[in-house]
Amino acid sequence: MLEIGDVVAVPLPLGGFGACQVTAAGGELTVCVFDWHSDAAPALDDLRGARPLIIDHHSWEGVPQILSVEAAAPLPAGFVRLGSLPVSAGMPRSTGAYGGWPALGVQVVLQRHWDLRVPDEVKAAYKSAAPGQVEADFGGRRIRRPAMVSGLDLRELHGEVRWAGLDALPRVTSLTWSGPDRGLAAALSSRPIITSLHWADPPGEVDLGGTHLNDLTFAGASPRRLVLPPTLTRLRLDAAPPELVTAAAGGRWIRVTTRSGVPAGLSGVRDVAMEVAGDLRLAALDGLAELESLRIQWLRSYGGLVGTTAFPKLHTLELIDAYGVDASMLPPPGGALRHVSVASLRSSQSGPIKQRYRGSEVRVRLRGAKSDKWLAANIDNPLRNWVDDDRRAGAAACRAYSTASEAIGRLSADDPGGVADARQTLREFVERLNDLDGRHGMIDTLRREEAGDAFMALAARAGVPSGEAGSWFDEWRDF
């Protein structure tokens, strides 16, 4: 376990190294990031006298980058303990911000991008933006938006686009777009402040190599051929992957989230998240010899792991909603594997999974184990995992959903009064959740989203228009 004064070299998301130091210890470690960047891991002596990283990019106002990190959490792959140095008087020793080790390098990269690539006049416009509405002229269409808006949906634009309209909205860092390019890539290339793009139904050929994106999502479809910028760290593919991707270092710095495999050209990827229904055939990940971290989340229906594909550098395996997984499907101990985390599993598999790795260097974390009896009644209940936070309140939330689902199921799609009947059922569902949250305080941001998804699915079954259903949910909920 790390102690006060310990210094750690931090691999950065786009290559190179930063560094940090433990400045306080207790239930958590207080870790301050140094103002440091180097191509190779620094030596301990390099960091004597190093000062804290001060972040002032975007809306930050010149504060040191410091986090509380779980004391028992091991260092991730690539992090290196360098030794110990005295904590200087200028290093902060407390914070209300919490996070994990991987988050420590992110601000180094964001601050460097701001300092080195964003023009001074763009920074000044961002900082001076004031509340109020402004009008942006995109040629055939003028739109009014809050001057401080950060995310802009431009799917309503058609025909030729006057991209200079973006200049009226200096805080936009994220765009949503649909269909052909129509000058999008060129506009992004000249605007390093825009770093996130959600693109629905793109054309077959997409070249974003000159942009400054670090976050990219394709929805509805993926291009057949795709060129990625060297700044990209996150790629999400909600449809079949491209046939070929061109990326720096084979995508070494990119975390890929996908539902059907990693495309050719990304053989250097080290971090993959998969969202799957049914059995996952690991052959879909063949060729990823550099893979270090694999996260798999099962959607309905639930499945297991099929195949024996070996990942020689796999360090961390995380499984979520793994109700169809048994211990024999997991990789054996040995090699690079050090961390196995399984969330939401059958309790009958808890013992076998622990036994599989007993006596090895693999650290196992299991949570959300549920009995076969519980799962027989609740496996398709979208609120089933609420019992992991509070068993009694979570079970009540599941009953509230089941009651509403059964009532919706009795309605007739041909009944003119069906929507009115559904309205009462949906309101009672939300009121039961309001009551649970009032008594137990269990509905955080994630649970609110899950409750909203469950509500909207029930409303859709009853034929309630989505816009109307969304208004009802926002009106009725207290959480």
Image (cartoon, grey):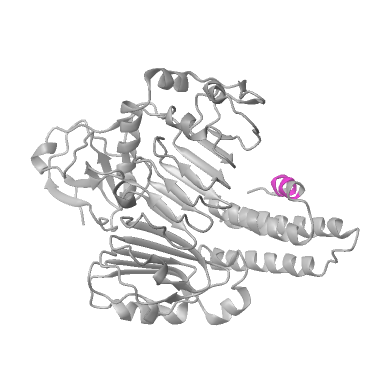
Task: Measuring from the top left, give residue 252's x and y in whole percent.
Answer: 31, 51
Task: Measuring from the top left, give residue 225's x and y in whole percent.
Answer: 45, 50
Query: Is 473 in the magenta?
Result: yes
Give left or right: position of 50 versus 338: left
Q: Nearer the viewer, residue 471 or 165?
A: 165
Res. 335 image quadrant: bottom left
Residue 133 can be seen in this image: no
Q: Residue furthest right?
A: 416
Give left or right: position of 83 versus 469: left
Q: Magenta region: which residues?
A: 469-475
The residue positioned 60% from the left and 79% from the top of the image is 376
The residue positioned 35% from the left and 56% from the top of the image is 271
Task: Measuring from the top left, give residue 167's x and y in whole percent.
Answer: 52, 21
Look at the magenta stretch and give its main secondary structure: helix
The residue positioned 44% from the left and 36% from the top of the image is 195
Give left or right: position of 215 versus 438: left
Res. 214 image quadrant: top left
Residue 42 can be seen in this image: yes
Residue 275 vertical placement versus 309 (above, below): above
